[in-house]
Amino acid sequence: METSTAAAVLISLVFSVGAQAPVLSMEPRVASVQQGESISFRCRVAGGQQPIQLEWRKSNNQPLADNVKIGPDGSVLTIAEAQPSNQGQYRCVASNPVGRNTGSAVLNVRYPPTVKLTPAGPLRVRVGEPVSIECHGTGRPRPTLKWKRQGSTLDLVTKATDDVNTIEWAVVRLEDSGMYVCQAQNNEGTTEVKVEVMVQGGHDAPLALVTVEEITAVQGHTVTMECRASGSPTPVVTWSKLRAPLPWKHAVSSGILTLTDVGRQDSGQYICNATNTHGYSEAYIQVEVESPPYATCLPDQVRLRAGNPLQLQCLAHGSPPLSFQWSRAGREALAPGAETTRDGRLLIAQVKVTDSGTYKCVATNHIGSSEALAKVTVKSEFRIGMDCLLCSLLF
């Protein structure tokens, strides 16, 4: 009896000495992904007494997000289309009858900047008042923040901390009126937010401001230009065009100038004028109207004898740059010996009867394309001679 008891104690001691808490390794330990990408972490069990149970947790015992899934055997954690909120530390907890062990992995989610202005504007202030606008930027990597005045490439002098860049005026002046832009930039992208500052003078002289300074439009489209004016009494807003009358297809309402069915002749500088009893103010918008090509061939019909040179010129009106391509109707390529130039010419040093046919020129720019045709008739020397012989016999 005593022998059996001693054997049982010895077996239990051997079992206890051989038992081991779980041994873990994490793959990967640190990962960095772009917003919208997916990532998986594997909690690999390298040893330990079975059975071993695995459980995934986020740091500070936060619940796992809806886009975080655990594999069937519990060893793989997958984050689908990672978002900034998924960033942080993830822990794999393994436990068995002997004990428990924890492995951790860190996820960094890179994403372009987001920007918020305080106050958001537009701001109406009076001459001499203090003004302060904070630009808050977030993103990973941490974005750099800077202020510019719209229409200028110079960075403004500002007060900057880690995540906030502040533009300040201790005493604002009338000429400080304008549109200001806070730009946040990191390796993932650039974000800009604008705020309008309208400074009203002591005598409430008018101030005209336009929302954009340059507009590029396509022929046939509608262009809208907005002008805002401050002052007291309320200024009268009128529109004009530099060195030309306004297009006949225009309308003005509440300071907004609308041009319909624009053409290239509508390009130019448009002037918003704000006037009251204390003076006037002007603001300018440059409009460029781009048009698709319109192609023609010179000449469009050619009759010549075999052996003579052929030259066709393709002309096109439209927004540059223009490119030209010649082809022959019913064929993919021109006949051997044909030469084309960048300015739209087709050259054949010595034409053959087989060069007769219809030739097509396609003019193209970044808006569209246009084609023109030229008919070429080539007669042989023999045919010309026969024609002359028939004429002499008839007459």
Image (cartoon, rainbow, N blue to C red):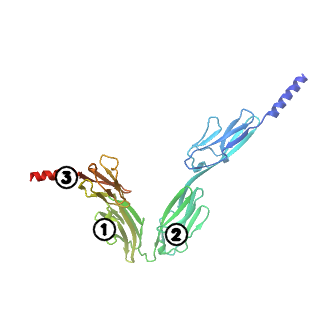
Camera-near label (2 vs 1) is 2
> Element at badge 3?
helix
Q: Is residue 1 above or below residue 351?
A: above
Camera-near label (3 vs 2) is 3
Front residue (pair 314, 292): 314
**Residue at point 20%, 50% (across, down):** 383
The span from disc 2 to disc 1 (Cα, nearest Å) is 34 Å
Mark 3 packing: few (<14 Cα in 10 Å), some, or many (20+)?
few
Q: Earlier in the sequence, mark 3 or mark 2?
A: 2
For residue 246, which numbered disc appears in the image? 1
Q: Earlier in the sequence, mark 1 or mark 3?
A: 1
Q: Is residue 24 visible?
A: yes
x%, y% of residue 232?
A: 41, 73
For residue 154, which numbered disc appears in the image? 2
**In the image: residue 108, left or right of residue 364:** right
x%, y% of residue 309?
A: 28, 57
**In the image: residue 324, left or right of residue 118:** left
**Residue at point 70%, 38% (across, down):** 45
Front residue (pair 31, 273): 31
